[in-house]
Image: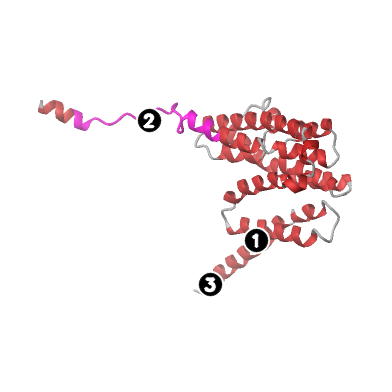
Amino acid sequence: MSEQTEIRSTERPLPPDPAAPAKPDSAVIRDALGVGVAVGLSGFAFGVTSAGAGLSLLQTCALSLLVFTGASQFALVGALAAGGNPLTAAAGAFFLGARNAFYGLRLSAVLGYRATVKPLAAHWVIDETTAVTLAQPDRRSARLGFTVTGLTLYALWNLTTFVGALGAGALGDTDAWGLDAASPAVFLALLAPMLRTAVERVAAGLAVVLVMVTLPLLPTGVPVLLSALAAPAVLVVQGRRDRATKNRTATGKDRS
C-alpha cells in the first residue's frame, strides 16, 4: 500500500491535448453571433438612409452586396444626400474603407488561409470580423469566429438593407428618426476599446477635431479625407519625440 501511494504521488499529470481548443466552440459562436446580429440589424438603417438619399433599390442593395463596409456606405450616401460631388463622396468612402486593407494584413497571418481562399475571405474583412477574430486565443477559434461573424453579418446586413430600402417610403424623413447615426455609433463602439495607447487616442481625437472644424467650411466628403491625415501627423510627432529621447539618453551615457 505504501509503495502504491509513493508511486501515485510521483506521477506527473498528463500534458494538455494540443488538439483541444483553448476556447470552446460554443463560446466563439455565441460571441460571433452576438456581434453579427447586433451590427447586421443596422443594415436596415442604411437601406432607409440610402433610399432617402435618392438611390434606387438596386443601387442600395448593390452597395451592401459589393462594398459591404458600413461606415464607407453611410459616408457615401450621406455625402450624396448633402449634395456633395459623387467623385468626392466616392473618394471619401474609399479612403474610409482603406483601413480594411490593413486589417487584412493582420488577419492573413492569424487565419493562415490558402491563396485560393484569401480573395473570398477578403470580402468579409471589416471592423467586426477583425475584432472577433483577434479576440480568439488560437487559429482554429479565430477561423471559426471569422466565418460565423462574416456569414451572419453579411446575410443579415444585406437582408435588412433590402427591407429598409423597401420600407423607406413608409418612414418618411429618415433624419427625424436619427437612423443615419446608427452605423457610425456602432463603428465608434467597436473602435473605442481598441484605442489602448496614448498615440491611438490622440490620433482618433485629432481626426474628430479635423472633421468638426472643416465640416462647415469644406464641401461634403472632404473633411473625411482630411481626417485621414491625423494618423501620419501623430506618428511623425511621436517619432520625433522618440528620437529626441534616445539622443538625450545617449548624451547622458556619454557624459557618464
Label 1 secondary element: helix
Give the crowd class for mark 3: few <14, some 14-19, many >=20 residues within 10 Å.
Answer: few
Residue at the image point whose x is 84% and y is 61% from the top: 217
| Residue that mark 1 sits on | 239
Colour theme: secondary structure
Disc 1 residue type (three-letter): Gly
**Which label sits in the foreground, 2 or 3?**
2
Extent of the magenta region: 8-32
Identified at 52% across, 37% down, the residue is 136
Q: Which of 25 and 177 is in front in this view?
A: 177
Q: Which residue is pictured at 66% across the width and 59% down the height? A: 205
In which quadrant of the rendered image does the N terminus lie?
Answer: top left
Residue type at the position of mark 2: Pro
Secondary structure of the residue carrying numbered label 2: loop
N-terminal-most mark, 1 or 2: 2
Viewer-side residue, 35 vs 93:
35
Check if residue 165 falls in the magenta segment: no
Mark-to-mark CA distance, 2 and 3: 50 Å
Q: Place residue 126 in its image quadrant.
A: top right
Query: Which residue is label 2 attached to?
Result: 16
Look at mark 3 in the image and give the residue it sits on. Answer: 252
Does residue 69 appear in this view?
Answer: no
- Determine the CA span between mark 1 and mark 2: 44 Å
Residue 136 in sight: yes
Q: Which of marks 1 and 2 is in front?
A: 2
In the image, 52: left or right of 36? right
